[in-house]
Image (tube, helix red, strand yellow):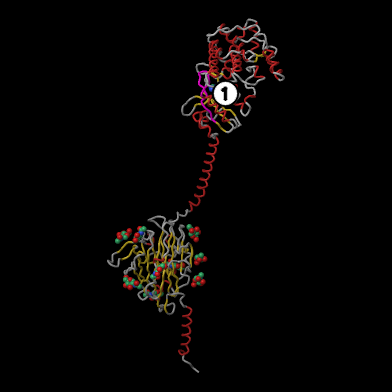
């Protein structure tokens, strides 16, 4: 039997249409995002939803692109797909955008609302291509997209009109129509400029009228309702553009060399005419006002920055080390009690500079206490001698410094002035007036160099006597020198003898019982009683002064060596000559007899008086000064006075003192006293 083809075809067509309808059932015809928190979007590239619910298309990194699409495709056709018979559906979209550029008037290209057949923009370029196309396919119909661009860069290649324009683009970056960003005032129809870049969110409406194939683009500040007159209006063949029934809607953006962030704050979409659902502006996440991040380091910066920061850290470390080193170099010890001695305290730095860092060329000599350097104080320009005394114990330091400072108050033309001190770890620095002519013993005992004449010698002796007198009598407390000797007498510019090192012997005493101080002084200058009492006195200073006078007059060291190599005390040696009546023979042969005989014998005789083994028999310094300047007559030396050998006596005494010191005293008590 024959059936009509139509009758048979109808159910098939119906079935086909039904199936077709089912297959094309739209995922959604309408949606609203008042903020994107929790939104289901297909994101790619730099696009992300921030914690605040902002759709961030670009994240402030340069030369990147970002895409965000509604996850499922939308059906833009009514009726059968493909061919000219298809009827397009109208649609409306509204969205709020914001651009945050690192500069107020310069940004990266911009962002675009896109209707596209595919979400795959992997071959598209960033920067001026806005993530939509590339140089090869720009404008090619195979791109299948319609875009509404918000463009903030003038790209001459695309015929851009300004750096603040809105355009309608089909398959490429060249706008079919474009306008400066802005809107037409409803009341006056006047155009009002808007800035895409001023970090203020604004709203855009994209309306497609399928019947007229017309796309209208409208924008306005957030606070305004949609203006009646669109900013742009142009016809597009949407069917041809998307080439099919389905397409995706979303946004594309990219950055160029400026690290901008492009945001979408809200978005609504509706198919089949009628305005897109209005956006609840009060619900919108705030556009971050100051979120413009510091420009992400560009490629060069990425290389330079680590190196620069490493160099910086390295430099800091070096500086820190230098500071530490300097601190260490100039470190001093300073304690509260020193405040009272403030004026007498020198900074180590000054002394370091004064002595050119304690250089060897500045070394004046090495004495019993340490090295002595010549220096010039930085500010005053005063020439000083800096004595470095190594001193480990902190104990007793306070007392010692107190004493040094007290001694610093002693001022006399025959004393080497102590100017101050400085304390460091394990080191004490004493600052004295500089004595240009050095120490007396060098002049006396150096075979080469100038010879001091008798007049100079006598003046030095008298000067030192005055210095000792000042120490013993003119100060409120008796200052014992304890180490009077030629090497402690320095000569100033006028060849005055000045006694130095006074009080320094106390340095040895620290922490020990003052009554059992160990013997301080120099062999040959030590008074015999020091051997058993160990206690320094004015008389022991006088004894040493006597030996000093002999040293100056005779030009010999206090311990002389005879032709047999035996050692004798200079005192005994002179006493022997005195007894032989040839005391002037003892005078320094380097004077070649050029001396005043009376003065020479006065000095010799006075020395012998001062060297009396009994402390009580020695004259006081007052008397010595009087004898020297002739205002008092020297007593005669008796035979008995000269009838002993001091060396033998001392040797015996030292031995005897081990058993009984009184016995020793008794042994020599029959020796007549000087007075
Ligand atoms: N104030 C000074 N001016 C110039 N030279 C000095 C001064 N003080 C010390 N000197 C020199 O430093 C050397 C050592 O001094 P010092 O320590 O006093 O010696 P000592 O401990 O043997 O008495 C001296 O021989 C002298 O040449
Ligand atoms: C931006 O996104 C890119 C790619 O997702 C990423 O490599 C970059 O670190 C991001 N930059 C910032 C500032 O988050
Ligand atoms: C997001 O949407 C897609 C497409 O509609 C769907 O497959 C997916 O399950 C959705 N994801 C979530 C988390 O809702
Ligand atoms: C981005 O798009 C490309 C091309 O479509 C795709 O290969 C890639 O997986 C996408 N990345 C993400 C994070 O969706
Ligand atoms: C457009 O792209 C296709 C495929 O990529 C290519 O074959 C065609 O030549 C291009 N057309 C133009 C005008 O560039
Ligand atoms: C709008 O801005 C453009 C570019 O800055 C300018 O040329 C134009 O005159 C402005 N128009 C109005 C109405 O302000
Ligand atoms: C940005 O421009 C809009 C209009 O174009 C204006 O209303 C707004 O006050 C401007 N904002 C700033 C921060 O200049
Ligand atoms: C588009 O704008 C024109 C005026 O330019 C207007 O007549 C028309 O109704 C608008 N269409 C839509 C869908 O808004
Ligand atoms: C739109 O494009 C399609 C396919 O390219 C074509 O068939 C149709 O005639 C075009 N419509 C108009 C109004 O140009
Ligand atoms: C907008 O949002 C606010 C707060 O979320 C709400 O109170 C208000 O009712 C909303 N307005 C509309 C028109 O939905």
- Judge by depth and name the residue closer to the eye, 172 or 319: 319
| In the image: residue 60, left or right of residue 359 | left
**Taking the image as drawn, is residue 268 in sight?**
yes
Residue 408 versus residue 179 in the image, above or below: above
Asked whether mark 1 lies closer than 8 Å to ligand 1, one says no
Asked which quadrant contains residue 573, the reply is top right
Instruction: Give the labeled residue for mark 1.
Output: 503
Local secondary structure at mark 1: loop
Magenta segment, principal secondary structure? loop
Residue 613: x, y in percent?
A: 65, 14
- Judge by depth and name the residue closer to the eye, 473 or 331: 473
The quadrant where ligand 8 appears is bottom left
Residue at the extreme bottom: 1
| Residue drawn at the location 50% of the way across and 31% of the way down | 342
Residue 145: x, y in percent?
A: 42, 69
Residue at the extreme top: 581
| In the image: residue 340, left or right of residue 619 | left
Q: Count how many numbered circles sit on residues in the image.
A: 1
Bounds of the magenta segment? 409-422
In which quadrant of the rendered image does the C terminus lie? top right
Residue 641 versus residue 370 in the image, above or below: above
Let me know if residue 456 is in the magenta part.
no
Asked which quadrant contains residue 254, the reply is bottom left
- Mark 1, residues whose alpha carbon is within 10 Å: few (<14), some, or many (≥20)? some
Residue 481: x, y in percent?
A: 58, 20
Asked which quadrant contains residue 243, the reply is bottom left
Residue 24: x, y in percent?
A: 47, 78
- Judge by depth and name the residue closer to the eye, 579 or 610: 610
- Judge by depth and name the residue closer to the eye, 330 or 571: 571
| Residue drawn at the location 63% of the way across and 20% of the way down | 522
């Amino acid at each position: 039997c024959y059936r009509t083809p139509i009758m048979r075809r109808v159910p098939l067509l119906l079935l086909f249409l039904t199936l077709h309808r089912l297959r094309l059932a739209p995922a959604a015809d309408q949606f609203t995002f008042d903020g994107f928190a929790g939104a289901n979007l297909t994101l790619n590239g730099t696009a992300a939803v921030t914690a605040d619910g902002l759709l961030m298309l670009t994240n402030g990194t340069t030369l990147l692109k970002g895409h965000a699409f509604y996850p499922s495709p939308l059906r833009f056709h009514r009726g059968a797909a493909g061919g000219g018979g298809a009827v397009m559906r109208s649609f409306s979209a509204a969205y709020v955008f914001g651009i945050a550029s690192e500069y107020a008037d310069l940004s990266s290209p911009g962002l675009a609302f896109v209707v596209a057949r595919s979400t795959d923009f992997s071959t598209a370029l960033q920067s001026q291509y806005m993530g939509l196309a590339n140089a090869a396919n720009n404008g090619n119909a195979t791109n299948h997209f319609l875009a509404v661009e918000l463009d903030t860069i003038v790209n001459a290649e695309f015929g851009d009109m300004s750096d603040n324009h809105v355009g309608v683009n089909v398959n490429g970056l060249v706008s079919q129509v474009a306008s400066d960003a802005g809107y037409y005032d409803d009341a006056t129809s006047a155009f009002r400029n808007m800035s895409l870049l001023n970090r203020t969110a604004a709203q855009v409406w994209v309306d497609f009228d399928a019947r007229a194939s017309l796309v209208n683009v409208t924008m306005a500040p957030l606070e305004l309702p949609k203006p009646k007159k669109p900013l742009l209006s142009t016809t597009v063949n949407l069917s041809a553009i998307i080439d099919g029934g389905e397409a995706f809607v979303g946004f594309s953006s990219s950055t160029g060399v400026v690290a901008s962030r492009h945001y979408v704050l809200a978005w609504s979409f509706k198919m089949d005419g009628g305005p897109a659902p209005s956006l609840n502006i009060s619900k919108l996440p705030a556009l971050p006002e100051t979120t413009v991040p510091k420009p992400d380091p560009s490629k060069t910066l990425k290389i330079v920055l680590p190196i620069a920061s490493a160099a910086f850290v390295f430099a800091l470390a070096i500086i820190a080390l230098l500071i530490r080193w300097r601190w260490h170099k100039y470190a001093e010890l300073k304690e509260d009690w020193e405040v009272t001695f403030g004026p007498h305290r020198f900074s180590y730095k000054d002394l370091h500079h004064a002595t050119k860092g304690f250089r060897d060329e500045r070394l004046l000599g090495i004495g019993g206490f340490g090295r002595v350097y010549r220096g010039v104080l930085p500010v005053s320009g005063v020439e000083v001698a800096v004595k470095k005394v190594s001193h480990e114990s902190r104990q007793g330091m306070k007392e010692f410094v107190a004493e040094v400072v007290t001694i610093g108050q002693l001022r006399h033309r025959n004393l080497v002035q102590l100017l101050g001190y400085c304390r460091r770890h394990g080191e004490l620095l004493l600052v004295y007036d500089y004595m240009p002519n050095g120490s007396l013993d060098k002049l006396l005992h150096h075979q080469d160099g100038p010879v001091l004449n008798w007049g100079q010698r006598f003046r030095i002796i008298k000067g030192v006597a005055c210095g000792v007198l000042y120490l013993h009598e003119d100060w409120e407390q008796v200052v014992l020198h304890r180490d009077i000797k030629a090497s402690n007498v320095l000569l100033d510019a006028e060849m005055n003898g000045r006694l130095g090192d006074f009080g320094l012997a106390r340095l040895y005493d620290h922490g020990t019982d003052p009554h059992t101080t160990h013997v301080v002084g120099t062999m040959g200058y030590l008074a015999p009683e020091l051997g058993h009492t160990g206690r320094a006195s004015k008389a022991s200073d006088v004894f040493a002064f006597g030996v000093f006078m002999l040293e100056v007059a005779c030009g010999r060291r206090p311990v002389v060596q005879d032709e047999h190599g035996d050692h004798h005390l200079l005192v005994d040696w002179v006493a022997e000559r005195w007894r032989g009546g040839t005391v002037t023979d003892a005078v320094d042969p380097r004077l070649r007899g050029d001396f005043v005989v009376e003065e020479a014998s006065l000095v010799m005789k006075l020395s012998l008086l001062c060297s009396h083994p009994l402390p009580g028999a020695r004259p006081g310094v007052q008397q010595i000064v009087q004898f020297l300047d002739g205002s008092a007559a020297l007593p005669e030396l008796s035979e008995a006075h000269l009838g002993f050998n001091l060396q033998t006596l001392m040797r015996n005494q030292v031995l005897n003192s081990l058993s009984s010191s009184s016995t020793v005293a008794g042994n020599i008590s029959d020796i007549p006293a000087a007075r």
